[in-house]
Image (cartoon, rainbow, N blue to C red):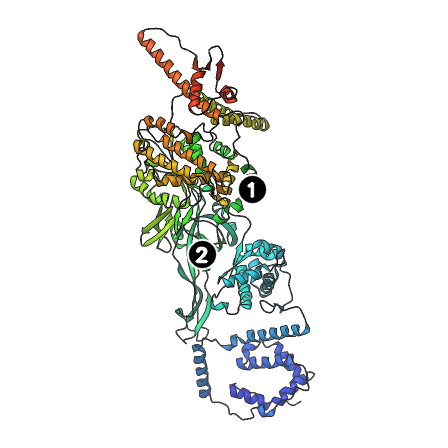
């Protein structure tokens, strides 16, 4: 065998070409004769080329390895193993001197620096491995193996499939190695390309197509699908989310680019978003065990920063040689620093190449616990959430959201200086943000709950049952309970030519001390799906609406929402409303009518949404409500804010022997029930009986009065109605009745001047009708809903009048006030009024006799003639009283009939 010519001492491009041309025949012999000793030595050198690569010439070794790899894959083919000698360069080249060679190498280095290249010695192995893998894949396709995907490129068959479950190193180290990483890529690529639903539809293939059609950047993946297809990958996704999401993002980008090759010109990165992560952690329950895990939390956004550019892929310039180094991946809280330039070993500061550096959007929000999830007496916890990429501006202050992200920690120098020992600040790096308002009902209501709610809605007396279920531990006050029930259900907002008309009801309660105003607010807070409670004495304009504060980290002014903003799509409860400053009350005018809050502070000009009902309670002037004065004269509130309340409720503590006796009996029964020492089974049975009696006494009805609803069931019923029921006005609605009522109401209000009647009251009428239709889960508003709304509004306005005009108003609007009132309830009310008059006459006669010096014994009974009751009944359209005398309500109230005197008697 002829040996090849001597190698030049220093390799150049010409010397390499000359050497290959002079030894072309020897190279051919090496390819064809593998049994010779020379071939064996060359083959051994190939196997050791990586070990002694640093001891031989870099360019020589790389080119020899290339030749030997060609020899390794060579197959003898006589027809092709012929070389055209005319194409060989047979010219002779002399060796370069040292100065010439140095000048050429300097020129090549300068060219590489201008083009941003690095030395080829660092790329030879990768290029050879890529070429070798490409040839192996091509050979498998030639042999018909199933190893190529139509979408996403060739499958990773460089290594044999491995068992991902068996590893004896930490999980993050195992994922970082090449073979498990490639196996995860292969499985996830196959998941995206082949996963189908029950109908055979390729779910994520269609999602990718929709992503490209909408020019989006996020590919949403259901965690349930991943668990079903790749349970181990799903588990690792929770335990090592940073490493796993980086792999999934890379694969998602490859699959998208395989379908749409030019999509990288729109978005450089594709993000995989994880949906429906099982289990929601509370913010106050986050501990160190959750660090670096994928978690899901929910809360209300209280503040939001501006959008900042954040470094993602950094390239720097070398001041020594001018080379562009990078790209380097920027970690979330760590700055990229280089020790030395690999080209010229320069050490120092490397300026950032702003033209080739890639930035991404960065924003931070503060997530606070939802008002309804905070334990009593506790301060709400909050946590910072970092939003990047297309998650920017996904939420605004006041929105209730669910965040899926990585719970991570970062060093905080300010805490270290303050506490004197290392303390880390924790944040949540968001992966997915979802507004809870859109899916609140579907998440909290089960299928069984929905069936039970629909069964309840079919009952004709469901509205009365709901009203009875409002604060059942409070005796009486049916009008207040009706107003609160309507406010909790609310109406439907309207959108007319870019303007919004509110659908929420505002209620104001004014009454004497001890009339359970605060108890009503507390019950509404516990029952409403979303409620924020505040007191007027401790609330300011900023605390109710919105304000700005300086962010401690970015030092910029950020927006922070108040109680009305946090109660968006819920209820805002304000106790001691009269104790607020006038300026603070004025600030909520816009929030109560337009349901928005305009902010113009510290250079921030924006508008926040406050779509909520306002239920307020206030004390009258002087502590007691004076019936001889109008409603406006009893409270220190201006007319503009009074007109923004749809319903005005007056709670008076009147001295009435009959009502006082029943109230005392109710309170005693409540205490006996709460202090019962019976077994749970007996206590449950007694509670049902007492609750039935209590409901009857509150309703002043007969023995067939409906039961109340459990508070949790009532809460779910309200949530279902507000989420799924949006009633509209029926086409055959009797609008003439509304027009006549409004005209009559306006005429009557001109003479009394208690509360000015305006168009807002007409809008309130339709809002209450829609709320009543929601109670029945109806899609249309009918005449009965409208009639009940007229009755409730009329009662509210009648109570706001002076005592001298109240009877006149009740007589004028009696046809509306008696709508759907039980005759027994109405007659019992008339009978109570007659007995009050009889009791007052008896007391006056006793005082007169005492002043005249006559001794009179105290009577133990009161008597009312049946003819007097019949006369009063005829004035309201009732002519037959026999059914009333036989009802259980008549007997339970303590009345009995004396046939001899044709009168009704009651013991006192």
Compared with 813, 658 (above or below) is: above
Looking at the picture, how far across and down is residue 312, in whole percent? Answer: 45, 64
Q: For marks 2 and 1, give the one nearer the viewer.
A: 1
Compared with 432, 42 (above or below) is: below
654 or 779: nearer the viewer = 779
Looking at the picture, how far across and down is residue 66, in whole percent? Answer: 59, 80
Q: Which mark is residue 387?
A: 2
**Residue identifier under label 1:** 450
Looking at the picture, how far across and down is residue 778, in whole percent? Answer: 51, 41
Q: Is residue 458 left or right of residue 506?
A: right
For this orientation, the residue located farthest to the top is: 854
Compared with 48, 870 (above or below) is: above
Question: Quick one: SS at disc 2?
Answer: strand
> Which quadrant of the rendered structure holds the C terminus?
top left
Q: CA distance from mark 2 to mark 1?
A: 35 Å
Question: Quick one: SS at disc 1?
Answer: helix
- Residue 524: tell me if it is visible: no
The residue sitting at 46% across, 59% down in the picture is 390
Do callouts 2 and 1 mark residues in contact (Cβ within 8 Å)? no
């Amino acid at each position: 065998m002829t040996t090849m010519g001597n190698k030049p001492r220093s390799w150049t491009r010409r010397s390499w070409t000359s050497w290959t041309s002079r030894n072309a025949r020897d190279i051919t012999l090496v390819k064809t004769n593998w049994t010779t000793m020379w071939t064996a030595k060359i083959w051994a050198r190939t196997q050791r080329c990586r070990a002694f690569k640093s001891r031989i010439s870099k360019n020589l070794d790389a080119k020899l390895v290339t030749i030997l790899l060609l020899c390794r894959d060579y197959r003898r083919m006589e027809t092709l193993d012929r070389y055209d000698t005319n194409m060989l360069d047979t010219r002779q080249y002399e060796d370069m001197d040292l100065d010439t060679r140095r000048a050429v190498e300097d020129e090549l280095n300068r060219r590489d620096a201008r083009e941003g290249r690095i030395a080829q010695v660092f790329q030879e192995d990768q290029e050879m491995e890529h070429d070798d893998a490409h040839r192996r894949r091509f050979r498998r396709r030639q042999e018909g193996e199933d190893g190529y995907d139509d979408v996403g490129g060739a499958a990773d068959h460089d290594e044999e499939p491995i068992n991902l479950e068996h590893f004896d190193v930490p999980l993050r180290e195992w994922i970082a190695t090449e073979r498990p990483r490639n196996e995860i890529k292969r499985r996830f690529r196959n998941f995206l390309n082949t996963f189908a639903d029950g109908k055979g539809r390729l779910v994520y293939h269609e999602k990718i197509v929709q992503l490209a059609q909408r020019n989006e950047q996020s590919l949403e993946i259901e965690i349930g699908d991943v668990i079903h297809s790749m349970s181990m990958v799903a588990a690792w996704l929770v335990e090592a989310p940073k490493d796993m999401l980086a792999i999934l993002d890379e694969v998602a980008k490859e699959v998208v680019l395989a379908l749409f090759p030019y999509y990288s010109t729109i978005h450089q990165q594709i993000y995989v978003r994880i949906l429906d992560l099982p289990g929601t952690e509370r913010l106050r329950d986050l501990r160190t065990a959750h660090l670096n895990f994928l978690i899901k939390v929910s809360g209300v956004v209280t503040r939001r920063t501006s959008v900042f550019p954040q470094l993602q892929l950094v390239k720097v310039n070398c001041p020594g040689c001018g080379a562009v180094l990078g790209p380097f991946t920027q970690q979330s809280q760590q700055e990229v620093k280089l020790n030395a330039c690999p080209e010229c070993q320069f050490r120092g500061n490397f300026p950032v190449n702003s033209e080739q550096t890639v930035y991404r959007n960065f924003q931070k929000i503060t997530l606070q616990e939802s008002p309804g999830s905070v334990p009593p007496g506790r301060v709400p916890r909050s946590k910072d959430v970092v939003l990047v990429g297309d998650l920017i501006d996904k939420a605004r202050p006041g929105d209730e959201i669910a965040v899926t992200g990585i719970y991570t920690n970062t060093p905080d120098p300010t805490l270290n200086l303050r506490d004197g020992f290392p303390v880390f600040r924790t944040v949540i790096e968001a992966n997915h943000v979802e507004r809870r308002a859109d899916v609140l009902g579907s998440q909290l209501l089960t299928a069984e709950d929905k069936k039970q709610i629909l069964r309840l809605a079919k009952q004709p007396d469901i509205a009365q049952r709901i009203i009875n279920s409002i604060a059942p531990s409070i005796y009486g006050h049916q009008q207040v309970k009706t107003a609160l029930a309507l406010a909790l259900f609310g109406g439907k907002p309207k959108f007319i030519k870019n303007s919004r008309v509110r659908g929420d009801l505002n209620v104001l309660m004014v009454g004497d001390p001890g009339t359970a105003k605060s108890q009503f607010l507390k019950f509404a807070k516990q029952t409403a799906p979303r409620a924020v409670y505040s007191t007027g004495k401790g609330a300011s304009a900023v605390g109710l609406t919105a304000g700005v504060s300086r962010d401690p980290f970015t030092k910029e002014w950020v927006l922070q929402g108040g109680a009305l903003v946090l109660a968006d799509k819920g209820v805002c409860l304000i106790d001691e409303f009269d104790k607020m400053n006038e300026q603070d009350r004025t600030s909520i005018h816009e929030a109560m009518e337009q349901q928005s809050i305009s902010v113009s502070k510290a250079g921030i000009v924006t508008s926040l949404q406050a779509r909520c009902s306002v239920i307020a309670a206030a004390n009258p002037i002087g502590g007691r409500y004076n019936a001889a004065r109008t409603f406006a004269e009893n409270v220190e509130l201006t007319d503009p804010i009074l007109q923004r309340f749809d319903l005005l409720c007056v709670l008076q503590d009147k001295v009435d022997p009959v009502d006082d006796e029943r109230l005392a009996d109710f309170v005693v029964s409540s205490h006996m029930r709460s202090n019962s020492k019976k077994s749970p089974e007996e206590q449950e049975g007694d509670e049902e009986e007492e609750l039935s009696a209590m409901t009857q006494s509150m309703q002043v009805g007969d023995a067939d009065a409906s039961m109340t609803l459990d508070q949790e069931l009532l809460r779910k019923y309200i949530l279902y109605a507000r989420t799924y029921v949006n009633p509209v006005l029926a086409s055959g609605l009797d609008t003439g009745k509304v027009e006549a009522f409004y005209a009559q109401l306006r005429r009557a209000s001109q003479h009394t001047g208690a509360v000015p009647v305006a168009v807002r009251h007409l809008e309130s009428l339709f809002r209450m009708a829609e709320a009543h239709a929601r109670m029945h889960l109806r899609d249309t508003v009918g005449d009965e809903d409208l009639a009940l709304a007229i009755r409730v509004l009329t009662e509210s306005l009648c109570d706001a009048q002076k005592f001298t005009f109240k009877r006149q108003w009740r007589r004028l609007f009696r046809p509306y006030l008696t709508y759907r009132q039980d005759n027994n309830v109405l007659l019992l009310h008339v009978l109570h009024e007659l007995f009050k008059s009889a009791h007052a006459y008896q007391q006056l006669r006793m005082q007169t006799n005492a002043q005249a010096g006559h001794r009179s014994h105290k009577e133990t009974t009161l008597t009312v003639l049946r003819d007097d009751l019949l006369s009063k009944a005829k004035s309201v359209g009732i002519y037959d009283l026999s059914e009333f005398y036989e009802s259980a309500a008549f007997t339970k109230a303590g009345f009995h009939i004396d046939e001899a005197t044709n009168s009704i008697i009651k013991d006192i």
